[in-house]
Image: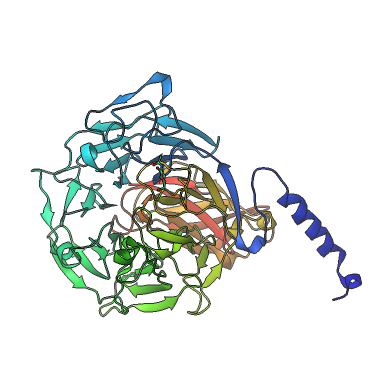
Amino acid sequence: MTPNSIPISFILQQILILFLAAVPGGRILTDAAGGSWEVLKSDIGISAMHMQLMINDRVVMFDRTDFGKSKLALPDGKCRVDREEIALKTDCTAHSAEYDVVKNTVRPLMVLTDVWCSSGSLAPDGRLIQTGGFNDGDDVVRVFRPCSGCDWEEIESALDRRRWYATNHLLPDGRQIIIGGRAQFNYEFYPKTGNTQAYDLPFLVETNDKKIENNLYPFVFLNVDGHLFIFANNRAILFDYSKGVVVKTYPEMPDGHPRSYPSTGSAVLLPLKKLQRPTIEAEVLVCGGAPKGSYISAVKGRFVGALNTCGRIKITDPSPKWVMETMPRARVMGDMLLLPNGDVLIINGGSAGTAGWEYGRNPVFNPVLYRPDNQIGSRFEVLNPSNIPRMYHSTAVLLRDGRVLVGGSNPHALYNFTGVLFPTELSLEAFSPSYLDPGYANLRPKIILPVSQAKLGYRQQVTVRFTVAGTLNGNLVTVTMVAPSFNTHSFSMNQRLLVIGGGSVKPLGKSTYEVGVVTPGSGNLAPSGYYLLFVVHQGIPSEGIWVHIQ
Ligand SMILES: *[C@@H]1O[C@H](CO)[C@@H](O)[C@H](O)[C@H]1NC(C)=O
């Protein structure tokens, strides 16, 4: 192509790109097809090690109370005095904060006991129930209500066992199950019914390598039959928690390599579809991690290359098998997030070493997209990079507007900003997948009905009304529901996406349409609680609305 033959539109586009790239606010606009990054806050004062999106579009985050002084003061000159505390006995700084997505502001919160490496879940009523942590916080349950000005409420000795590095999941009956944790080969429920009790889970003994404890933060998903899929180390079981019985043992990952902490890969339950059929299928995808022996090597200062494989398994199959796929980037400590259109985003982490203090290397700046419905071999796409390393203790959550909030990264025992390879990160970024590009504005649906916070029942017919400014392709409309998950240590607890309808779209006046959907048939498919509902058109999602299923 000679300079003379370059179309004017191309030149204008290049000028526009140069112009937009210079816009202050840190928005990196490179190849639009690969999404864009924006620094929302360069310094929120704490490192977002755990995050949960609340139903008022605020994100509750926290690091640990024994990190020393944070850069976020507690309000009104408050201080926390704790004689048990390791770092500071009197600490007038916050270790938890509430981020307001709409206003882009941060409010300090007061957490009294140590929440380090803990777990949690939203309750069906939208409260965050957070469990365990370290030291004086390991058997504490903390409640955070989604109301303005609210703060943590703590319930001492509420857990039967100390829970540090455990995984939680919301159950169809509204309780949550808390599984494992360091030196805990058992599970318990919260709230408790009857006697305070933990129940043994021998699977956690079987998958425990005593030198490494490589079965922490197990990947747990509620299967469509009501049993729990539990993956630890390099294999999984299907567990009937009500009877304490293993109902299925899945084959080991074909390569035998571990995927749970500290070999930290990540996992998702792929979108649940065709929910009206008598048998519903469920698939799990596990990606990345660190090969066997990586942790011991990292301790000795040798940083082994991360795994570049994903294993995908139909967990509802009578004889399930792992199907292995190769990612374009090797990754350990990546986060896997379900996007509103059913694609999977793999983001954060490094390409060598393991989880644990100082043990990760070579940040992977490019997220990768996985399209589960494409043919094998054409599912992955490398997306545009950030320039902030997000190593151990980094986080990612989906927001209602379809962006992904990214924060944290602190591979050190304390806050450390100087003289280290990966300084403690106090920033918050948003990754906007390409579906948010302004070029898709004409395709983007806008939901009119139901209204946000609508109450829905199970197996209920619901009419979803929406507008699309441009030309609608009625065959390419789906309605999805995404559960707001609790994210820490590269895993999103409670993450699930349900496709509840699509297809039969009815025009209703200019640019307005209706589509009939049926809500999930039971709490096994969708435990009671709040979900984000999206209308997706040609892969472009609307803003979500909150719906409450009960
Ligand atoms: C940060 O890490 C460096 C290198 O290990 C160390 O020398 C320094 O003391 C650390 N600073 C803090 C505040 O822990």
Residue 455 appears in the rendering:
no
Q: Is residue 251 left or right of 312 when viewed as pictured? A: left
Q: Quadrant of residue 459?
A: bottom left
For this orientation, the residue located farthest to the top is: 76
Query: Residue at position x 21%, y 53% from top?
Result: 182
Number of marks present in the image shown? 0
Ligand 1 picture quarter: top left
Query: Residue at position x 30%, y 47% from top?
Result: 117
Residue 194 appears in the rendering:
yes
Q: Is residue 281 left or right of 441 when viewed as pictured? A: left
Q: Looking at the image, which is closer to me, 174 or 312?
A: 312
For this orientation, the residue located farthest to the right is: 4
Q: Looking at the image, which is closer to me, 19 or 387?
A: 387
Rendered location of residue 402, percent (x, y): 53, 52
Q: How is the image coloured?
A: rainbow
Rendered location of residue 199, percent (x, y): 11, 54
Rendered location of residue 469, percent (x, y): 68, 54
Rendered location of residue 394, percent (x, y): 43, 51
Q: Quadrant of the N terminus?
A: bottom right
Q: Looking at the image, which is closer to me, 44 or 527?
A: 44
Q: Looking at the image, which is closer to me, 461 or 328?
A: 328
